[in-house]
Amino acid sequence: MGRPKNFSREEVLEKAMPVFWKHGFADTSLQELERATGVNKSGLYTEFRDKEDLFVACLRHYLESQGKRGLLTKEPLGWKNVEAFLKNGPLNKGEQQGCFSVNSMREFAILPDEAYGVVTENRALLQRLLAMNIEAEKPKIAASAIAEIVLSFFSGLCIESNLKPRKTLSSRKIDNFMTALRSL
């Protein structure tokens, strides 16, 4: 009979995620994950098949926690929700910059297929939620087309938040973007 584990899966995900977020998948070592989580290699491999499995679990955990914020489902639907999503979406907290999911897209070539699926499913969900909010405002062009533009803008904001020296997210940039969107 094996020893009982002395950690929770969620705690490991919470501690491993910032390491992957900062260094990316390729540049995160098992030793860094052990150090960050306080769980040795055998403990990690008992809970997760491998580094890829841990990464995908972190990605899922992150996206599930983002969904709990409900920025795009708040009633009434409309531009206010879209603006709140843009202003509250990309994180700039310590070494965690931008969006873990968007940052992960830079490594799609080396990530497991499952990670690609998790990210693309989430982006499709975001696009549908954005389109619902935009449709509520009765735009002149297709809400789905505007939602694609918003999602691309959001991705750009997330990537820009990684620039050094780190610049704070420009509220003015989002205000200008929202003015343009409202005219569509």
Image (cartoon, rainbow, N blue to C red):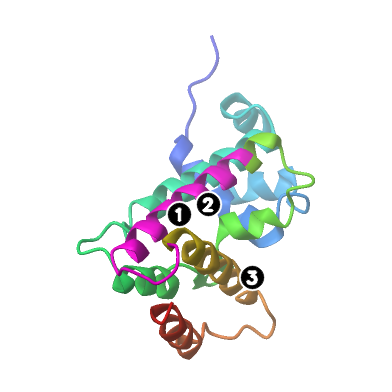
Bin the neighbour count of mark 2 within 10 Å (Cα to Cα): few under 14, some 14-19, many 20 and up.
Answer: some
Figure check: 56 above or below 182: above
Q: Is residue 135 magenta?
A: yes
- Identify the mark nearer the N-term, 1 or 3: 1
| Residue 21 location (% of width, % of height) | 62, 58
| Main secondary structure found in the magenta portion | helix
Q: Which residue is mark 2?
A: 123
Three-letter residue code for mark 1: Leu
Figure check: 183 above or below 119: below
Q: CA distance from mark 2 to mark 3?
A: 15 Å
Q: Which residue is mark 3?
A: 159
Nearer mark to the viewer, of 1 and 3: 1
Q: Which residue is mark 1?
A: 126
Q: How many marks?
A: 3
| Residue 172 location (% of width, % of height) | 46, 90
- Identify the mark nearer the N-term, 2 or 3: 2
Task: Name which quarter of the figure residue 80 lies in.
Answer: bottom left
Pointers 2 and 1 in contact (C-beta within 8 Å): yes
Front in this rendered view, residue 139 or 175: 139
Task: Name which quarter of the figure residue 56 lies in.
Answer: top right
Bin the neighbour count of mark 1 within 10 Å (Cα to Cα): few under 14, some 14-19, many 20 and up.
Answer: some
| Apparent side of residue 65 relative to residue 14 in the rendered image (left or right) | left
Bin the neighbour count of mark 3 within 10 Å (Cα to Cα): few under 14, some 14-19, many 20 and up.
Answer: some
Three-letter residue code for mark 3: Ile
Seen at 45% across and 54% down, the residue is 126
Which segment is the magenta one?
117-142
